[in-house]
């Protein structure tokens, strides 16, 4: 009976600590969910960036495209000099002419 005030005080302090730990746990869970969403967005942006790098290399390096064409398609003996048209040359082209592209796999 001599320590009842101290026991009640310690129980009250423990109760406050329990509620504070539940509150902080709830806040950290919300932060963890937000961090996971941000990580997923970053991963999507990284994938998009690598795709854009590949598209940029295709756009700026027509010789690489020609090498790929030689690997995957048979070489045409009738017309050995094929001209690869870039996007900028298509946009410069006047609207009277029409450019058709046809790829046939053999």
Image: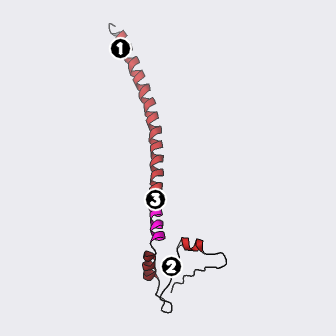
Query: Residue at coordinates 42% horizontally, 75% vertically from top-left?
Result: 64
Q: Secondary structure at mark 2?
A: loop
Between residue 89 and residue 17, name the one nearer to us: 89
Is 50 a magenta residue? Answer: yes
Disc number lying in front (2 or 3): 2
Disc number lying in front (2 or 1): 2
Label disc, if present, on residue 7 of the rendered structure = 1
Marks 2 and 1: CB-CB under 8 Å? no
Tell me the residue that label 3 is attached to.
49
Quarter of the image for residue 3 reads top left
Q: Residues within 10 Å of mark 2 (few under 14, many from 20)?
A: few
Q: Is residue 46 above or below residue 70?
A: above
Marks 2 and 3: CB-CB under 8 Å? no
Q: Is residue 88 above or below residue 105?
A: above
Q: Which of the marked residues, 2 or 3, is nearer the chain's N terminus?
A: 3
Q: Is residue 62 above or below residue 20?
A: below
As measured in the structure, the alpha-carbon distance from the residue carrying label 1 to the one carrying label 3 is 62 Å
Tell me the residue that label 2 is attached to.
84
**Outermost residue, right direction?**
96
As measured in the structure, the alpha-carbon distance from the residue carrying label 2 to the one carrying label 1 is 87 Å
Query: Residue at coordinates 59% horizontally, 72% vertically from top-left?
Result: 92
Q: Position of residue 19 (x, y in %)?
A: 44, 25
As measured in the structure, the alpha-carbon distance from the residue carrying label 2 to the one carrying label 3 is 25 Å
Q: Quadrant of the N terminus?
A: top left
Q: Residues within 10 Å of mark 1 (few under 14, many from 20)?
A: few
Q: Position of residue 57 (x, y in %)?
A: 44, 68
**Outermost residue, bottom direction?**
78
Q: Position of residue 47 (x, y in %)?
A: 45, 59
Magenta span of residues? 47-60
Query: Residue at coordinates 48% horizontally, 92% vertically from top-left?
Result: 77
Q: Which of the marked residues, 1 or 3, is nearer the chain's N terminus?
A: 1
Q: Please, what is the dominant secondary structure of the magenta stretch?
A: helix
């Amino acid at each position: 009976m001599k320590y009842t005030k101290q026991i009640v005080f310690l129980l009250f302090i423990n109760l406050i600590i329990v509620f504070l730990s539940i509150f902080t746990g709830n806040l950290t869970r919300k932060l963890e969910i937000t961090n996971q969403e941000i990580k997923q967005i970053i991963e999507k942006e990284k994938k998009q960036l690598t795709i854009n790098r590949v598209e940029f290399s295709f756009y700026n390096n027509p010789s690489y495209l020609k090498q790929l064409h030689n690997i995957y398609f048979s070489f045409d003996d009738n017309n050995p000099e094929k001209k690869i048209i870039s996007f900028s040359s298509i946009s410069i082209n006047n609207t009277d002419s029409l450019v058709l592209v046809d790829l046939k796999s053999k």
